[in-house]
Structures are given as structure tokens and as C-alpha cells.
Image (tube, helix red, strand yellow):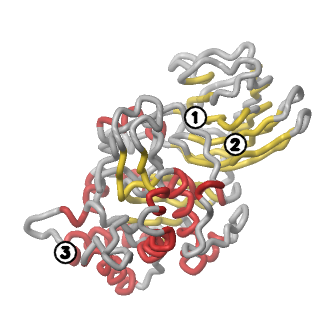
Amino acid sequence: MRTKLLHLMLLTAISAGAQSLPQTFNTKDLPRYTPETGYGFDFMDSPSKGSKKPYYFSIDLPDGNYKVTVKLGSKKQAAVTTVRAESRRLFVENLATKKGQFVEESFIVNKRNPKISDKESVKIKEREKSKLNWDNKLTLEFNGDSPACESITIEPADESVVTVFLCGNSTVVDQDTEPWASWGQMIPRFFNEKVAFANYAESGESANTFIGAKRLAKAMTMMKPGDYFFIEFGHNDQKQKGAGKGAYLSFSTSIKTFIDEVRSRGGHPIPVTPTSRRSFDKNNKIINTHGEYLDAVKWVAEKENVPIIDLNSMTATLYETLGVEESKCALVHYPKGTFPGQDRDLADNTHFNTYGAYQIAKCVIEGAKTSAPELIKNLRFDPKYCPSKPDEAANFKWNLSPFFEADKPDGN
């Protein structure tokens, strides 16, 4: 659906380097985004009248948290709109408006690029260079059965906004392409405009490689006292071999490094046990495929007296409840031809699809109710989730983003 007006108000409080913009943009006059314009419709043509295709808007901004307010709806027809940001972070979900009805929704988007200082940058992977999470622009995706956005207002987030930094691997990262998804890109949906999620996770990372790539160093330049760090590793760490490697050696040392760095800056570190793999024994129970690494997370948390979220236990319950065959509906199991351009079967027992990621985000929230009760006060709504009573997969609604990739994320 063609947007009639995009009103972007960048307050003077935006730090130096922000795109200088007029306050109001009419879509009829909006350019295609280029580095020279610094704003405009991105990746595809601007929405045409009556179109039900998703569309994107990008604007160059310095690193930081931004409050985004979208006015959704249309004077001419009913609409159903979903709003995601950056690499498919979910914020507004299937919001229906009647003809002539408008609804405003506000949320916080964290924006960053790899630069740490004039001499240092995050060592992002080659394929990350095309990711929307690591560029100079804030990008919004308007999707849904018939997306309609009347206006957008962007302003710097209030300094009181709490940032939740997510550190982890492919089970946490904002996955860019269908049908892959992770809990880190679903969890923003449940929180109000007093919380920002900064997802620094990346596929294939271990705790030590995350630190070595300077992802933690970058996060440290952005955090403030009172912020949270959710730390989930283990899947890839357990594959490391050699002197000094092991659950109670390099892995535990790295987890302690996260805790020490966050605490030294007044933050709240919260280790998260690694999600279960879909691996069943003969009694249809989930096998612990993480070995000592699962217990090592708990050991470090107890030793350092920090709260923990036992996501491994909850995801095991989720898969066992769904059962051996039905649990495939939470992961990337799709026959050839399910998605445009899919030339082979997909059968992955580690990485989630959008339904699975959504369920696991709810598990994280349940765990946070005891490990981060002050943060939970900022829920937009309480999902009141129990992994032994998962949502029906058939009732889960997700409009596909236009980008697909058959290759699985790094790591397993």
C-alpha cells in the first residue's frame, strides 16, 4: 500500500553527523535511498497504490538508540501492517486498521556500525557487510497482508531507555533472510519504548571469538550503567580443540570476562544456557548435546553470583512437548520448493524458523521474570508462556520478507 506521507522529525539533540533533513517528506517526492541522499525508499521501488508488497525506508543516522513512532493505517482502505527494523527485528505485529482508522505505535531501535574508534573496528565477517545491522543507516521494513504507513517520526531515545545487549551465536543473532530466525530478533516485540535491544550476536561465534572480534569492545562503548547483557554461547565453543580449550578452561574464562566487563561499568550480566538441539533419544527425550558446556555456564553464574536463564531446559521441554515429528515445525525443515529459489530440502535441527524463534523469545522472557524482574516491568504485554503448552504453529502469522537464502547460518 502506498504511504501517503512520511514525516521524519530529527530533533536538534541528534549528535553531529546525523543526516540533515527537512521535517516533512511526502512520498511523491521521496528519492530512492543513496549514500548521497542519505534517506529514501530502499532495496526496491516505492510502494504503489494498492500494492500489498513489503517496502523499506532507510535514513542515515549516527550510532545510538532512536524512538520511532509510526502512524499506521489508510484513509482509503483497511490495512494489516507489520513493522520490522534493521535485520528483521520485530516491533509491530499484524496490526489491523479499518478504512480511515490510524493507530500510532512507538518503539526503540538500536542502530550501530562497526566503528569503535578511529583506529579500531569490529571484525565483522565478509557476509555481514551486507547485513542491515552493521551499516550507517536505520532501516524500517513495512510488511503485512496490506501494509499502510501514514507517517514516521524519528527522534533520539531518552537517556533513561535501558539497553539490553544480546551476545551470542546463530541462535540469538538477527537473521536477515527467510526462513531463518532467532529469538533475539523476536524479543523486541514484547517490550515498550523504555527498552532497546542491541543484538551483537553473530552466526558461528564462540564466547572467545566474539571477544576477539571486538564485538564486546564495541558494546562497551555503547553501554551505560543499568543496561543488561544477555550472554548465550556453547554451540560452537564445544567444537574448539587444543591446549587451553574446554568447558572449564577457555569457555568459562570467556564467560567470566563478559561478567567482569559488564559489572565494571555498572551493568547487569545474565548468562543464558545454550538452546537445545532437536536431538531425541529412543524414549523421545531431548539429549544434552552440549556436554560439560551446559554445566559450565551454570557453574560460572553460581561462582560469580549472577542470575541465569536456563534456556536449555525450556527448549528441551518445548521440543519434547511438540514431539519428534511436530518439533520440526519450530526449526528449518522445509522440502525443496517451499520458498522461491529453494533448490534443495532444508533439514536443520539447530536453527529456528520464525515460529520457533517466537516461542523461544517467550521462553527467554519467562526466564527473565526471575533473573531480571526490573526489566520485565517494561513488557508491552506479558505472553505468560509455558514451554509445555506452546502456541499452535498453525496459528502463527508471519509475512515473509522478500529475501531468501538456502545456506544455513554458520555454526551448529
The quadrant holding residue 398 is: top right
Which residue type does callout 3 highlight?
Leu
Mark seen at residue 211: none
Q: How many numbered marks have been drawn onto this rendered protein structure?
A: 3
Q: Which residue is mark 2?
A: 68
Res. 270 visible in picture: no
User: Marks 3 and 1, how far apart in space?
Assistant: 40 Å
The quadrant holding residue 295 is: bottom left
Q: Earlier in the sequence, mark 3 or mark 1?
A: 1
Q: Which residue is mark 3?
A: 249
Residue closer to the observer: 145 or 48: 145
**Is 392 drawn above or below residue 1 in the view shown?**
below
Determine contact: label 3, label 1, CB under 8 Å: no
Question: What is the quadrant of the N terminus in the image?
Answer: top right
Q: Which residue is mark 1?
A: 139
Res. 250 visible in picture: yes
Disc 3 element: helix
**Residue 201 placement, left or right of 22:** left
In the rendered image, residue 271, in percent from the top left (x then y), is placed at: 42, 72
Which residue type does callout 1 highlight?
Thr
Disc 1 element: strand
**Is 146 drawn above or below residue 66 in the view shown?**
above
Which residue type does callout 2 highlight?
Val
Disc 3 crowd, CA 10 A, few/some/many (<14, 14-19, 20+)? few
**Residue 361 placement, left or right of 380:** left
In the rendered image, residue 50, in percent from the top left (x then y), is placed at: 76, 21
